[in-house]
Image: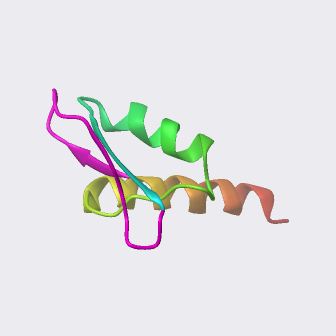
């Protein structure tokens, strides 16, 4: 998933046949929740800050599940 400035949307295909979906967002917390809902089928390629937020939430969740 590639996230872009507000108002821009695009759907294309990667070389491996997977979808590349570009979505606008204003509040990264909202998009993080969207991404987490679809893990492990989705990923964040270009928005490093957003990718870091997703990774942080995943690690926090795993830490809570580990006895």
Pinpoint residue 14: horizontal percent, then vertical percent. 37, 65
Decide which of 64, 57 is in the foreground and name it.
57
Pinpoint residue 37: horizontal percent, then vertical percent. 61, 41
Point 38% across, 72% down: residue: 15
Pinpoint residue 57: horizontal percent, then vertical percent. 53, 52
Farthest residue, direction right: 67
* Total numbered badges shown on the rendered structure: 0
Point 26% across, 57% down: residue: 47
> Residue 25 lies in what quarter of the image?
top left
Decide which of 22, 36 is in the foreground and name it.
22
Location of the C terminus (image quadrant): bottom right
* Magenta residues, start to end: 1-17
Q: Is residue 62 left or right of residue 60?
A: right
Pinpoint residue 17: horizontal percent, then vertical percent. 47, 65
Farthest residue, direction bottom: 16
Decide which of 13, 30 is in the foreground and name it.
13
Queried whether the magenta region covers residue 20, the answer comes back as: no
Point 58% across, 57% down: residue: 58
Q: Is residue 33 left or right of residue 47?
A: right
Q: How is the image coloured?
A: rainbow
Q: Is residue 4 above or below residue 27?
A: below
């Amino acid at each position: 998933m590639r996230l872009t400035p507000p108002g821009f949307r695009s759907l294309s295909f990667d070389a491996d046949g997977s979808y590349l979906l570009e979505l606008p967002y204003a509040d990264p917390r909202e998009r993080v929740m969207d991404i987490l809902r679809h893990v492990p089928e989705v990923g964040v390629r270009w928005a490093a800050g957003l990718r870091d937020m997703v990774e942080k939430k995943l690690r926090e969740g795993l830490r809570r599940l580990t006895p």
